[in-house]
Amino acid sequence: MGRGKIAIRRIDDAASRQVTFSKRRNGLLKKAKELAILCDAEVGLIVFSSTGRLYDFASSSLKSVIERYHKTKEESCLVMNAISEVKFWRGEAGSLRQQLHNLQESHRQLLGEELSGLGVKDLQVLENQLEMSLRGVRVQKDQILANQIQELNRKGSLIHQENMELYKEVNIMCQENMELHRKVHETSGENDDNRGTVVSYTFHMTDYTNAPLYLELSQPQQQADGVQSGAPNLRRLQLLNEGP
């Protein structure tokens, strides 16, 4: 008779469970050893019993097997993460390309292009969008113009105030000039007798920087009684400006 199948579940009887563990543990260790020898594989096996006892097997060194396992696991995780990241960004790129295509199509439709495939409802929706956009543009334009007008009014008020200040300064200067003219007219009677003794000075300067500069004093007038009415005769002076 053939051997019946054993249900793979926990054995309730402790003795039977211990016997089964010993048999299968020895069989597992034997299979691991055979696999390492026959296939030239690096095998590491760790088993803990229900009582906490450790059983292990390694074809070379259990420590090296564990280190190689961790290293390979980390590399595998990095590769998997890289693959997952590549897949994620590919999906994002595809989604962005689709969004760009939709936006370009919508833009062309707003410009009045490629409308042949649209129905009446789609055209009405497009018309409503254009009207709303036009309304928003007009509101923004009116706001900008209102701000500019307000700024110009403010600048005009400042200029008007400055003009008022300048008018006040001009009026003050006119009053001072009138006061000076009045004082001059009052003192003009006292200086009428001494006008003949005033020496007339003439200053001539050319428009060129490097040209010679002349200073000239006019000769005093000879009166009828032979008395000179000014300073004595002075010779002509010539001053030359030195260039830079």
Image: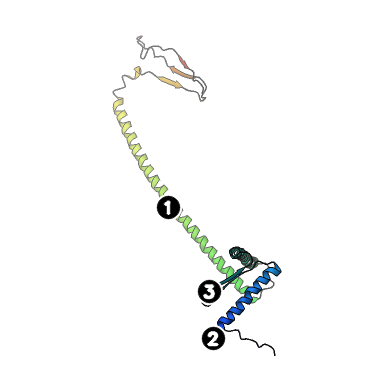
The residue carrying mark 2 is 13
Residue sitting at 56 percent across and 83 percent down?
17
Where residue 162 appears, as percent x and y from the top left, is: 39, 45
Query: Can you identify the residue that label 3 sits on?
Result: 53
**Place of residue 118 in the rendered image (x, y in percent of width and height, measured from the top left):** 66, 73
Residue 154 tag number: 1
Find the residue positioned furthest to the bottom: 1
Percent position of residue 237, x then y: 45, 15
- 202 up-or-down from 137: above or below: above
Amino acid on which disc 1 is placed: Arg
Q: Is residue 15 above or below residue 172?
A: below
Mark positioned earlier in the residue sequence (1 or 3)? 3
Asked where in the image residue 48 lies, by quadrant, the reply is: bottom right
- Disc sitting over residue 15 in the figure: none
Closer to the camera, 5 or 197?
5
Viewer-nearest residue: 17 or 242? 17
Q: Are marks 1 and 2 in contact (CB under 8 Å)?
A: no
Is 224 in front, or is 162? 162
Q: Residue at x 56, y 81 (%)?
A: 18
User: Does residue 23 appear in this view?
Assistant: yes
Task: Label 2, secondary structure: give it.
Answer: loop
Between the C-alphas of marks 1 and 2, the distance is 101 Å
Task: Say which amino acid is labelled 3.
Answer: Arg
